[in-house]
Structures are given as structure tokens and as C-alpha cells.
Image (spheres, rainbow, N blue to C red):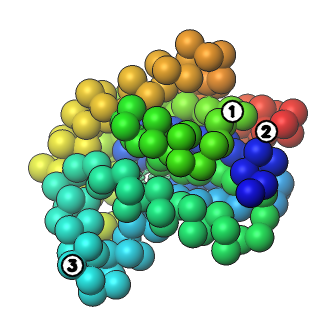
Amino acid sequence: DGSVSHKVVFVLGGPGSGKGTQSARLVEEFGLVHLSAGDLLRAHMKSGSPEGQMVADMIKDGKIVPSHVTISLLQQAMDNSGKHKFLIDGFPRNEENRSSFESQTGIQPELVLFFDCPEEVMERRLLGRNEGRTDDNMETIRKRFKVFIESSLPVIQHYEALGKVARINADRSADDIYKEVRRLVVEL
Ligand code: UP5
Ligand code: MG
């Protein structure tokens, strides 16, 4: 099915660490396909279906949406792109996401970018964003941080053990971060 030829980079890091910002730059320079799991889920929640409503409720509460929903959105987006190099931003968020994605798609990431950023810096960025996201309020931000530490960090540790993680200090200007990030991706 061609999945063996798919090249995937996972872009991980806490809420507000700069995944979307850096992904947009990489896409512009390298022409990869940017798949933000959060953006796909936010589009899906506007579909008006019962599943869309469930996704909306979970995002507002900072919870991780069931894998089958996210993976089917990612799979569709990959299929529809007609391309084979992808930057997957904000996924996988827990071990179940990771193992289901790997077994269902047969894809292993080439590289995992981990944007490491102190919570107080991420909090300030999220509260300053003002894009009307239902999860950018102090109550939900606290829950997102907790879910990140408890459920998402183990995914990064899993890939660290496989030598796939590039840890990037994300508490710097977007320009400084990108200088480091582009050098990692240019090598792929
Ligand atoms: N900014 C960025 N970089 C900066 C820098 N270096 N210096 C100063 N400011 C910087 O950046 C956030 C803000 O900071 C922006 O205003 C930006 O200009 C500024 P951004 O690049 O948007 O950061 P990002 O890491 O993408 O933050 P985001 O809020 O998108 O991260 P989340 O991981 O919280 O959000 P995501 O959309 O991935 O997920 C949202 C929710 O969807 C999850 O909580 C969950 O409920 C659900 N979800 C799932 O259930 N499953 C999934 O697989 C994915 C999502
Ligand atoms: Mg984002």
C-alpha cells in the first residue's frame, strides 16, 4: 500500500511550545505536508455530527480524543494529499495513540522533534494567543499541562530509547529555534 515509503516526522511538545509555528516554517521551506492533529480535530468538531460534538467536549476539557478518531482523520489527510512526506504535529499524545498508529499504518517516524519549554512560558503564550480556542483558558490549560506530563511524555521517552528524539530548547525566539530545527530536517 506504499506506507513503507511514507516518511514521517512527529512534532511533539507541550501546549504552546511552538509546534504549529515551527511546523509552518518547515513546510514553507521543505514542502512537507503539515498535518496538525489538533487542527484536523477542530475541523471535525464543526461537522455537526455526534462524533464532532464528542471531540468538541473533549478538547474543551483538555482530554485526549480516542485514537480511532484521530488516526482516521490523519490517514484520510495523508491519502488525500497524494504526497509521502509528512510533518505530524501534536500526535501521538499517549502510548495508545502511538501503538495504534504504528500498527494501523505500518509507519515508524524518521525523527521526533521535541519542543521542550517551561510551563510558565507556554502558559503566557497560550493566554496571549487570542484565536478563540475553547481550550485557551486557565482552567483547561492546567488540565492540558497535566495530560502532557502524564500521558504524552511517555511517548517521547519511548522514542528517546529508540534514538529518534531531537530535544530542542523552545524557550527562545522562533527564529533561533528554527535555525536549529531546519538543520535537523534538512538531513532527512
Ligand atoms: N509562539 C510560538 N513560538 C514562540 C516563540 N518561540 N516565542 C514566543 N512566542 C511564540 O504557539 C503558541 C503561541 O505562542 C502562538 O501565539 C505563537 O505565536 C506563540 P503554537 O506554535 O501555536 O504552539 P503549539 O505547540 O502548536 O500550541 P497548541 O496550543 O496548538 O498545542 P496543543 O498541543 O495544546 O494543541 P493541539 O492543537 O495539538 O491539541 C489541542 C487539543 O486537541 C488537545 O488538548 C486534545 O484535547 C486534542 N488532541 C487530541 O485529542 N489528540 C491529538 O492527537 C491532538 C489533539
Ligand atoms: Mg498547535
Q: What residue do we see at 56% from left, 13% from top? A: 161
Mark 1 or 3 closer to N-term?
3
CA gap, disc 2 to disc 3?
39 Å
* Residue 156 in view (yes/no): yes
Q: Quickly name the residue at label 1.
A: 111
Secondary structure beneath dot 2 equals: helix
Q: What residue do we see at 76% from left, 45% from top? A: 4
Q: Amino acid at mark 1?
A: Leu
Report the number of numbered marks: 3
Does the CB distance between marks 1 and 2 fall below 8 Å?
yes
Indicate whether 8 appears above or below 115: below
Q: Amino acid at mark 2?
A: Val
Q: What residue do we see at 60% from left, 68% from top? A: 77
Secondary structure beneath dot 1 equals: strand
In percent of width and height, residue 188 lies at 84, 37
Q: Camera-side residue: 117 or 106?
A: 106
CA gap, disc 1 to disc 2?
8 Å
Callout 3: CB less than 8 Å from ligand 1:
no
Q: Quickly name the residue at label 3.
A: 50
